Amino acid sequence: MVCLSSVRSVAFDFSVYEYEFEKLNIYDRFDKDILHNETKFLINYLAAGDGEIDSNFFNTKEKIHLVEVKTLFRIADTLINIAAILSIACIIMIYIFVGMLYPRIATRNDYLKKIVSFLLVASGVTVIGTCLLFILMTLTFDFSFILFHKIAFRTDTWLLDPAVDNLIRMFPQQFFFDLFMRILYACIFFGAVFLGVGSLLKKSM
């Protein structure tokens, strides 16, 4: 849930696009005002749009690809909601499990400590596993990038031509690598925060 939320926060942050456009010299390819307007329009479309994007800036192939990208974000939203529900269910199950495993816990405070301990272990395993996965993908980004597109998209509309397709001229592969690294850092940061808060909470009990 943290990683998917990080994807959304990065993907829909216009300041990230501005920074990358400057870093990758994308402003040399487009008029700055047009680029900004189309990027904002694109972000809004991916966040809450319906049908094909209504812009002459993108050709038919790009519009079909953007519909598929938007579908991935809808799936991500659904997974976030499911993960939230499962997280609540897991907390309830841990609460019940601790009561069964330690039936002779003397005080409510000790009971809560056991629950927090289980949550910390589960969070730690999740964070470490996610970090290892992301690091592996970072080391093999080119391969992972192509493999992801082959799995995620049913058509070959993601195979864009920088000579004619504005989408890839705006967002070269380096752009996605930089976004990927931002998402990785966000996952590590929020995971560390959760573990730190949980540790402090346990010590204060």
Image (cartoon, rainbow, N blue to C red):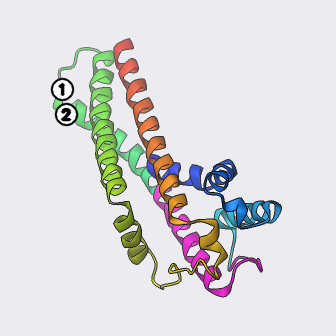
Magenta highlight range: 52-81
Would residue 44 be visible to someone looking at this image?
no
Residue position marked by numbered label 2 in the rendering: 100
Please say if 194 is above or below 70: above
Give, as a three-letter code, the residue at label 2. Answer: Met
Packing grade of label 2 (10 A; few <14, some 14-19, many >=20) is: few
Residue at disc 2, secondary structure: helix
Residue 103 in the image, given as x and y percentages of width and height: 18, 26
Residue at disc 1, secondary structure: loop
Q: What residue is at 38 percent from the left and 65 percent from the top?
A: 142
Please say if 69 is above or below 196: below
Residue position marked by numbered label 1 in the rendering: 103
In this view of the protein, which residue sits in the foreground, 149 or 167? 167
Real-space Cα separation, disc 2 to disc 1, in angstroms? 6 Å
Q: How many marks?
A: 2
Q: Quadrant of residue 93?
A: top left
Please say if 158 is above or below 130: below
Please say if 205 is above or below 122: above
Q: What residue is at 55 percent from the left and 59 percent from the top?
A: 175
Magenta stretch, overall SS: helix
Residue 73 in the image, given as x and y percentages of width and height: 55, 64
Give, as a three-letter code, the residue at label 1. Answer: Pro
Would residue 77 be visible to someone looking at this image?
yes
